[in-house]
Image (spheres, rainbow, N blue to C red):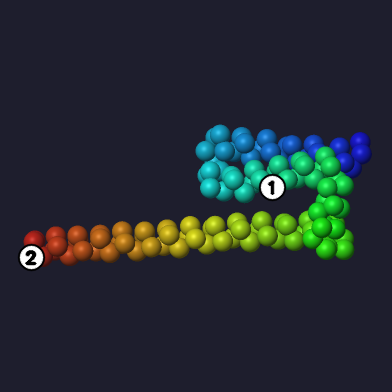
Amino acid sequence: MTPQAFAIILAVALLIVVILLLRSYVLPEKYAVVWLVAAVAAIILSAWPGLLNLVSKFLGIAQPINLLFVGGFFVVLLLLMQISLELARTRDELRKAVQKLALEMERRSKDDG
């Protein structure tokens, strides 16, 4: 098996896994978009490896593999940003729920006393 065929098989397997995780509601839609784009990009770059050379020359990057590392780094940064925003939103929701619960408990203690 050639390395190109192996890369195509792995990229298609990644796409199938992402779709199965999305369909089984394990992977939320907001995260699935990034993974679907990454899987499709992997399939395209595996099927047409000359495309990576063309894009890297267009962008002025000397080695095509460096373009892959930059792209992967960018995807990881997007995922980190998305997770950070979700964490901040969840923290704010939790703070509001705790404050609401504390006010309710305070009202009940005043009514009982």
Q: Is residue 7 visible?
A: no
Q: Is residue 94 above or below residue 16?
A: below
Secondary-structure class at tag 1: helix
Q: Residue furthest front?
A: 58
Q: Would you name the residue on which mark 2 appears?
A: 113
Q: Residue at x 76, y 41 (%)?
A: 43
Q: Residue at x 87, y 47 (%)?
A: 50
- Left or right position of 2 against 102: right
Circle 1 crowding by C-alpha within 10 Å: few under 14, some 14–19, many from 20: some
Residue lying at 41% horizontally and 62% vertically, measured from the top left: 91
Q: Nearer the viewer, residue 45 or 6?
A: 45
Assess disc 2: are there few (<14), some (14-19) or many (≥20) residues with their C-alpha within 10 Å of its C-alpha. few
Quadrant in which the N terminus appears: top right
Specify whether residue 46 is in view: yes
Q: Which residue is mark 1?
A: 38
Residue 41 horizontal side relative to residue 46, left or right: left
Which image quarter: residue 65?
bottom right
Q: Amino acid at mark 1?
A: Ala
Front in this rendered view, residue 9 or 111? 9
Counting from the top left corner in percent of width and height, residue 23 is at 56, 34
Q: How many marks?
A: 2
Task: Name the residue type under label 2.
Answer: Gly
Q: Earlier in the sequence, mark 1 or mark 2?
A: 1
Residue that appears at 80% across and 45% down: 45
